[in-house]
Amino acid sequence: MLKWKIDKNVISELYYNEQNIIYPWGFETADSSAFYSLEDGYGYRYKIISENIKFSDKYYKAKIVTKMKEGQWELNIDDKIIDDKTIERKVEAITLEDSFFMDFVVRFRFKKEFIEYVKIADKVIYHKNTNIYYQYPVEEVFLKGKELNIKISIVDKIIPNGMKPVMYVRDNNDEWIVHVRMIPETWDKEVIKLCTSWAKTRPLPQFLSNIFLEWKWLREQLWYRGERDPYKNRIIRKFLNPCAFAIVKLAKNEKLMWNVKCEIL
């Protein structure tokens, strides 16, 4: 039987057979500068305009209007426990003005101790703490457990023009991270961000990003670097960690939506 705990605006614990099998789930998105996380206490360079959250032992609903550095949108969350082994999560955003997006993510996190390996796009991934994003254009991810199996699958989606749907798994420290994600397919600009704790993924000035990314070799080195090939040098990771990303611009009144199911098999 599934039971959850809601804390800091997210599903913070999920109990199956009286064991908490997760770290906090949530939702996240970013533009060139701001990073929004549904989990209270995370994110930066955004402002909550209004927020209405309510939940019980079976549902979690939220309506949040957020002002980012490069846009504003209304977010609607509808998570619910369907039965003893199934959770369905729906997240929808409507742009209230022209807005930029780096991605649009429903996040799942599972404790490593409960999972032996993960299967995505017919590839079996064992936990080696690589922190690589094993990302593919798929509709489901399977997690093979010692005492339980888990399937995360896309039920429905609304993908705006200029974006594409993907899923990824990531083996980081003592957890498995699964993201159901929209990313730019065509884009309006490219930015270089310093992905460090001190910089809080702050972008370089746009004119510098434009200049540096004109250099083909450097562009190839930086393009989604932290996701596909994290820097091995600790000094670079700590003080610079530069990565380049695509950013898409969506017009006012565009909609993004994920409807995702998580099943214990």
Image: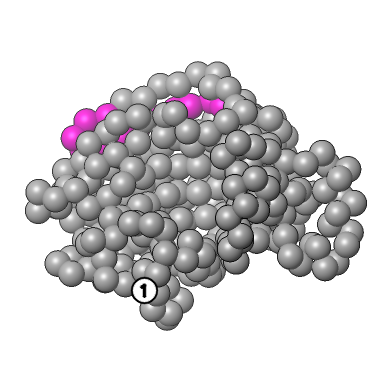
Q: Is residue 232 visible?
A: yes
Rendered-image quadrant of the C terminus? bottom left
Residue 138 falls left or right of residue 44:
left
Q: Is residue 144 above or below residue 51?
A: below
Query: In this figure, which residue is indicated by the disc labeled 1?
Result: 126
Q: Is residue 164 visible?
A: no
Which range is magenta? 55-66
Residue 78 falls left or right of residue 100:
left
Q: Is residue 13 above or below residue 61?
A: below
- The residue at the point 36 percent across, 45 percent down is 25
- The residue at the point 66 percent across, 59 percent down is 224
Count all numbered tags in the image, as a single digit.
1
Query: What secondary structure do most residues of the magenta stretch adopt?
Result: strand
Q: The residue tagged with tag 1: helix, strand or loop?
A: strand
Residue 98 within the magenta-colored segment of the rendering = no
Q: Quadrant of residue 51?
A: top left
Residue 149 position in % (x across, y down): 22, 67
Residue 122 position in % (x across, y down): 42, 80
- The residue at the point 58 percent across, 22 percent down is 47
Q: Quadrant of residue 93?
A: top right
| Residue found at the far front of this picture | 235
- Disc 1 marks which amino acid? Tyr
User: Of 225 and 83, which appears nearest the observer?
Assistant: 225
User: Of 121 and 59, which appears nearest the observer?
Assistant: 121
